Image (cartoon, rainbow, N blue to C red):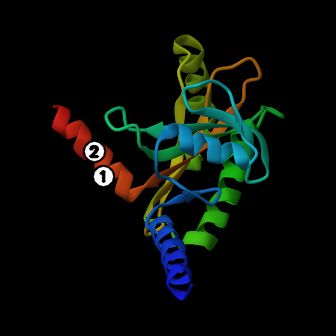
């Protein structure tokens, strides 16, 4: 009986140790096959949008977030998660609204992981009317996403968390705050698999 109990405890310890070797998203280790990982996110309250690993749900107090599971085309293993937090245009100064929300999330990530290892913060450019007018014209013409000139990267020890803001041409004229969680081990395995294919 003691032998069986010892084996069970060893198995639980092994599973806990394996989970600690990977970056987590909503408490779920970023590891394993896409379908398994998606099912674990569904248990956390997310809903599948389609079969490609895109889900929808609440994240960090924001509703209607789109979650994209990033996985290796070669191995099918998950290496990251990208979250788009929608920022609908509430007023004419939506750029500052996005920036304010970005700064709140940056402060929360700093509290959790420490100071960013990389940071670019040039909100002054985003406030200049001439620049914004030109930017809006460009976006209206090409209908592509424009990354705002502020972003930061946090090293969690098990991977990275990237945070940035973006404006995208849409009917509501809103934008997104984008957070990307990258697992160090699986991202490196994905990089090697891509290199092997070259």
Residue at the front extreme?
1
**x and y percentages locating residue 124 in the rendered image:** 58, 48
Could you tell whether 195 is left or right of 16 in the image?
left
Q: Which mark is residue 163?
A: none
Q: Position of residue 153 (x, y in %)?
A: 47, 57
Asked whether the viewer can see residue 127, the reply is no
Residue 63 in sight here: yes
Asked if labels 2 and 1 touch by Cβ distance under 8 angstroms, the answer is: yes
- Residue 160 versus residue 150: which sits nearer the camera? 160
| Residue 191's disc number | 2
Q: Secondary structure at mark 2?
A: helix
Residue for point 48% across, 67% down: 156
Nearer the observer, 183 or 120:
183
**Quadrant position of residue 89:** top right
Quadrant where the C terminus sits is top left
Q: Residue furthest bottom?
A: 2
Residue at screen point 46% across, 62% down: 22
In the image, what residue occupies the spot 50% across and 39% down?
Answer: 34
Q: In the rendered image, which quarter is residue 94 located in?
A: top right
**In the picture shown, does residue 80 fall above or below 118?**
above
Q: What secondary structure is found at the residue carrying circle 1?
A: helix
Mark 1 and mark 2: Cα distance apart in space: 5 Å
Q: How many marks?
A: 2
Q: Is residue 129 left or right of residue 72?
A: right
Q: Tell me if residue 136 comes above or below residue 98 in the rendering.
A: above
Q: Note whether 1 is above or below 176 in the view shown.
A: below
Q: Residues within 10 Å of mark 2 (few under 14, many from 20)?
A: few
Residue 188's tag is: 1
At a point 49% along the width and 60% down the height, the residue shown is 23
User: Within 10 Å of the Cα at label 1, are there few (<14), some (14-19), or many (20+) other Cα atoms?
Assistant: few
- Check the image and name the residue furthest to the right: 90
């Amino acid at each position: 009986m003691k032998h069986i109990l010892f084996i069970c405890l060893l198995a639980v310890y092994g599973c806990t140790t394996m989970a600690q070797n990977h970056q987590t998203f909503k408490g779920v280790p970023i590891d394993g096959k896409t379908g398994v990982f998606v099912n674990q996110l569904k248990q956390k309250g997310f809903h599948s949008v389609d079969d490609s690993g895109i889900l929808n749900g609440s994240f960090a107090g924001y509703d209607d977030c789109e979650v994209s599971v990033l996985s290796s085309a070669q191995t099918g293993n998950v290496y990251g998660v990208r979250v788009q937090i929608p920022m609908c245009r509430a007023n004419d100064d939506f750029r500052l609204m996005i920036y304010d929300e970005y700064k709140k999330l940056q402060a929360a990530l700093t509290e959790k992981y420490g100071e960013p290892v990389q940071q670019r913060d040039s909100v002054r450019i985003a406030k200049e009317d001439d620049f914004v007018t030109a930017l809006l014209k460009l976006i209206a013409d090409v209908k592509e996403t424009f990354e705002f000139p502020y972003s930061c990267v946090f090293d969690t020890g098990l991977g990275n968390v990237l945070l940035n803001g973006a404006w995208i041409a849409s009917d509501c004229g809103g934008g997104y705050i984008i957070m990307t969680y990258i697992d160090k081990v699986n991202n490196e395995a994905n990089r090697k698999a891509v290199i092997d294919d070259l």
